[in-house]
Amino acid sequence: MPTQKTRQEHTETRLADWRPYPWKLDSTRLAFTIAPQATTVESTLVFGPGENGPGAEGPADLVLDGAGLNTLALTIDGQTIDETHVSRGEETLTIAAAALPPGGFTFAARVQIDPAANTALEGLYLSGGIYCTQCEAQGFRHITWYPDRPDVMAPFRVRITADQPVILSNGNPVGQGEGWAEWDDPWPKPAYLFALVAGDLRAVSGAFTTMSGRKVALNVWVRPGDEDRAGFALEALKKSMRWDEQVYGREYDLDVFNIVAVDDFNMGAMENKGLNIFNSKLVLASPETATDTDYERIEAVIAHEYFHNWTGNRITCRDWFQLCLKEGLTVFRDQQFTSDMRSAPVKRIEDVLNLRGRQFREDQGPLAHPPRPDHYQEINNFYTATVYEKGAEVIGMLKRLVGDDGYAKALDLYFQRHDGHAATIEDWLKVFEDATGRDLSQFKRWYVDAGTPRLTMTEAWDGDAGRLTLRFTQTTPPTPGQPDKPPRVIPIAVGLISPNGDEVLPTQVLEMTGASQDFTFDGLAARPVVSVLRGFSAPVMLERPIDAATQAFLLAHDTDPFTRWEAGRALARDSIIAMSQGGKPSAEYIPAVGRLLADTAADPAFRALALRLPSEEEIATAINAAGDVPDPDRIHAAREALARDIATTHRAALEATYDAMAVPGPYAPDAGPAGQRALRLAALGLLNRIDGGARAAALWESAGNMTEKQGALMALIEADRAGDALAQMEAQFGANRLVMDKWFMVQPLAASPDRAPEIAAALAERPDFDWKNPNRFRALLGGLAANHAGFHRADGAGYRFYTDWLLRLDPVNPQTTARLCSAFETFRRYDPARQALVRAELQRLAEQPGLSRNTAEMVGRILG
Ligand code: PHE
Ligand code: ZN
């Protein structure tokens, strides 16, 4: 039995310690005999001399990774390995060089594993009777002995014997019969992209003809009975395949592409070569069960995983520190795809909201890390908003700096130079340097430094000369392990608007490189209004002295949709902050909302975004950034009061908007009608504060789609009259896991803060709180954590309930437990009493005997 380690004993992996693997893996053959408690895995690995192998520094040992394996046999070239040549570490097996023919050899192993006991959902496991695998980042070592690192790539041939109707693996099918199938993947890949699925599944199928005329069979595999909810995912896949050909020139490279939906999954989805495995919530959709947001997300994640075929699979990462090489780029690509499929301005605003809500928050707290970290204890803790979303922002900046043509040239060079290899961030930057002739050494800081720069702008106007000078200064606050931050390159997109509302200078990108820098604009007839950080051209926090009247002017006249929206957002934010501190809302804000409601020519989706009030979390973040201590109760009360003020002042306009945005005819998940529904629900949310839930009750009765049903339900919960609706929903959808996840989530989320922890606790007692299922667990705990004032309730009930459940889940599923610890990452913002309560809960976690490495690392970093 391995001994349990305490927090301090867990070792760190460092980028500086990376060394090439000393052997070259030429091919991998696997044979699985599937059985619930005892699956046998036979592996045959053909090794040749590596670049740094024999000859370089003498013969090299063979180091293989493995965890929880019952090893039955190990051979080299067919001979059992003499035990004197074998040494075992905690998760490694080392075969001494003396036992290895230097010119190459075949290693074979036979092991047994227990998928039925695998609740961590890493390696081979069972989800509702379906065998499936999850190998990223280091799951393959739970399947067999292997060099489980992304820079060891090999073609795979896999034979699977299973008493199951459908048996899938990576690549192309090469043979099948009753109870067995064989698959061949010719494209060399690392072990983390391996996958296997066996179960009773049904396919929703289609076909795609690639740009060079090859026909690809497409299948979305679901459980019997779910076929009618898989069509949208299949169409999204076709669109993604076409888009990647048209925009990036990337063609698919196998005869089949399979997607499988499973209910038990730690993350969203996984890009295994030719066999993507998805959390069922990101595949299954029907108008009655999925919201507009679900549809948009399904389309984006299908695209994301498909795009990984080139950015991640054909070109993979040399080591896990380079994770943002594939994730930042693939998120950037899926964002571009959604912008092309839907509304680009709306998508940009949604992405910025998400970035600020999750990544800025991470960057401001104890979990801050660079997009490319240089050390970790548990790599699974680095699948973060910083690696993904900030990683994508950094690429957006790069594109802005080198221009569209430079970006296209650099990407072509990237695919040409690195196809079939495992690359680094240095390789990535080098293709941009080589393609554009630009020096990117300063730009690299974005990859290696943590923290969100604070950018301040001041203006100087010389009326006689008609000259405007903008002075920018940047500083980045210290983050764990990084006290000093040199200045970065910041692309700042600006435009100038004349006092009459005409644009006098269209968008220009200023390139800031110093700590402080001036930019001048000449030949101006009158002092213009500056529209700055258009399109959110860099992930920074902008501070500028600006009065509410100028914000209102920008909200009315800015030609850039992002900065236009941002101006309204700032007015709303400042109003709630002022009210939470005993003041009044900005005099400009409520009238500006009236103009927005009257502007019926504007895109409804944009108006919905502009009408929605900033979240309490966003307000707390802003108060904290200004150096004050946020009070969750006062923030909640202020936001409610502002919503009521708006509703009272603009009742008639809101009612007219609500009525006008009813979408006639059958439901379609497209951007147009989805935008109308979003605006309708935004109006409902405000009116709900003054009509006692009457409109919500009527909508609940009449709505024919889940978007409006869920909107109505949330409003009913807020109005404290949701009892019947909740009972009806349970009666209708009790057997539908995804709908019931929503049911579990909205109750703690929309509940009044003074009852939210108790509501969550009561729901946790229900027999259908299937807490070992990550979606169900996240629905309930995530719903509570997203209720800002409820989670942070002064008596600590929210913190206590949350921690009780983290303690319970940790031995069962460390990955999901560790991810949810981030709810505590902001605790130092709050008052000393709340800080003490959180600290006590974190201590309770830290002291738990046998706490997982995953959770131990998170708790240790949060406690600092
Ligand atoms: N690589 C997956 C994605 O981004 C995410 C993932 C990571 C899934 C680790 C499972 C485990 O698309
Ligand atoms: Zn990804």
Image: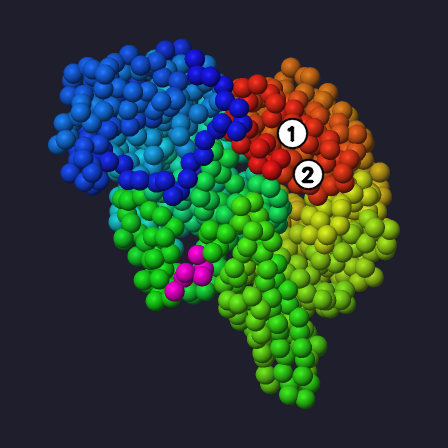
Name the image quarter holding the C terminus.
Answer: top right
Name the image quarter holding the N terminus.
Answer: top left
Q: Residue at x 83, y 61 (%)?
A: 587
Residue 288 image point, x, y percent: 60, 32
Give above or below for 450 relative to 49.
below
User: Dot 1: within a 10 Å radius of its alpha carbon, few (fewer than 14), some, or many (20 or more) residues?
Assistant: many
Give above or below for 233 relative to 394.
above
Please give the range of residues in magenta: 439-444
Question: Magenta span: helix, strand or loop, mainly?
Answer: loop
In the rendered structure, find residue 827 and report the number of the disc placed on it: 2
| SS at circle 1 | helix
Residue 404 image point, x, y percent: 42, 63
Residue 296 image point, x, y percent: 54, 43
Residue bearing mark 1? 842
The answer to the question of whether label 1 and label 2 lie on touching residues, with beta carbons closer than 8 A, is yes
Looking at the image, residue 769 sits to the left or right of residue 211; the answer is right
Q: Residue at x 86, y 54 (%)?
A: 583
Q: Residue at x 65, y 35 (%)?
A: 824
